[in-house]
Image (cartoon, grey):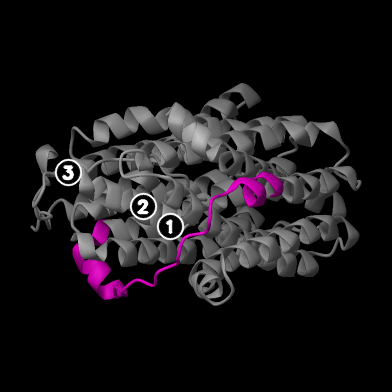
Amino acid sequence: MLTVLRNSWALLLGIMLLMLGNGMQGTLLGIRGAIEGFSTAQMSYVMSAYFAGFLFGSRMTPEMIRRVGHVRVFAALGSMISAVLILYAAAPDWLAWAAMRVVIGFSFSGVYITAESWLNNASTNETRGQALSLYMIMQMIGIIAAQALLNFGDPSGYVLFVIPSVLVSIAFTPILLAASTAPAFESTKRLSFAALYRASPLGCVGMFILGGIFSAQFGMSSVWGSAAGLSVRQISIFVAVIYIGGLVLQYPIGWGSDRFGRRMLVLWLAAAGALVTLAAGVLDLGFPALLVVAFFIGGISNPLYSLLVAYTNDFLDNSDMAAASAGLIFINGFGAISGPIITGWVMGRIGPEGYFLFMGLLFALLAAYALWRMTQRRVVVADQLGGYTPLSPSAGVLAVEAVMEAAQGDDAAGSQPPRG
């Protein structure tokens, strides 16, 4: 671990600073939107736009890198992010914000892909799992710390928009000056969505549903907090606790994943998520209880993402890993686009509690589908499972690809994925 940190500290520091900027802007817009008088429906479109841009970026960035190179793509997208973060405050209009969120989602997707390619290139087969774990930890630390920075300025002013812009600009300095030579960006064979679904129906459907959960959870948390009458300090703490839960519970759930059936674990976690969020939607909870809810919904949904990637991996051949990772990212992103919009619609009809009720219904749907899949395919026994590596939903396609390939490499040499 120390060797990985020594070799990749500049890249990891840059990633943390990038996540500080991204974490601030996501929460800040929900608070500022309420100050500007934007409706919940309008803010839901603003928040959804980020995931649309992220989806397009995941498909288009590889071709951009092949045409002009890592450094140019990295610098260009970084400049776009920094500029947009400033323009939010200069153009307080929800349509302008939605357009800018598409741009910033596209840019962050490209930045993640570029950074991950450098990280993979700087790692060996023996250290890649540690590097990816550090990458995930730095992402989470950046997002959590970003929530604290929201308390150092007035959300109705400019300062809180300037801070993430500066942080993002600074983030590129250690990365561009210290990163090793950019690796060649190889194109991979394509895997149709039909083939991916045949390999793992639960993986595909689960990633689609989780896309809606994540985008509602992370895109609409500050919108919900403003609608529920929480202060800026309370909103920042609530969002931070979601990510803290995701960081803390990744490893215990991962430990269970490598020893017990993944599908059963998906069922239990989804059912627990449904119970917690539906209870939060129907009960009148105080702020301390809401923090407990935040911890568990983050602690359940983040490991579910990693768990579904690992579960899908159990049914793939080595040659399909790269294409499957791109397919899973696309499915998750496609589901994420609708999450804020539906959440905003539900909140507009029944009030702030719709935020929790919508996520609860999605968790319940995932649990029901996992239960149904248990009647369709035999259980994959523990000694047939590939490895589990924690992943953040904000990770790009290269991180997912590296995790899938590394996990498959942990299996016994020459073993074939289970079919049943």
One can see residue 346 in this view: yes
Q: Secondary structure at mark 1?
A: helix
Residue at 34 percent of width and 27 percent of height: 252
Tell me whether the residue at label 2 lies in contact with that at label 3, contact meaning CB atoms closer than 8 angstroms. Answer: no
Q: Amino acid at mark 3?
A: Leu
Q: CA distance from mark 2 to mark 3?
A: 17 Å
The image position of residue 399, as x and y in percent, is 43, 52
Q: CA distance from mark 2 to mark 1?
A: 6 Å
The mark lying in front, picked from 2 and 3, is 2
Which one is in front, 239 or 409? 409
295 vs 104: above or below: above
Q: Secondary structure at mark 3?
A: loop
Residue at 62 percent of width and 38 percent of height: 13
Q: Secondary structure at mark 2?
A: helix
Q: CA distance from mark 3 to mark 1?
A: 22 Å
Q: Quadrant of residue 226?
A: top right
Residue at 50 percent of width and 53 percent of height: 118
Name the residue beneath numbered marker 3: 385
Q: Residues within 10 Å of mark 1 (few under 14, many from 20)?
A: many
The image position of residue 210, as x and y in percent, is 42, 53
The quadrant the C terminus occupies is: bottom left
Q: Residues within 10 Å of mark 2 (few under 14, many from 20)?
A: many
The image position of residue 242, as x and y in percent, is 55, 35
- Residue numbers of the magenta segment: 173-202
Tell me whether the residue at label 2 lies in contact with that at label 1, contact meaning CB atoms closer than 8 angstroms. Answer: yes
Residue closest to the far top = 288
The image position of residue 383, as x and y in percent, is 10, 38
Q: Which mark is residue 402?
A: 2
Q: Residues within 10 Å of mark 3 (few under 14, many from 20)?
A: many
Residue at 71 percent of width and 47 percent of height: 173
In the picture, measured across the screen, residue 4 lies left or right of residue 107, that is: left
Name the residue beneath numbered marker 1: 398
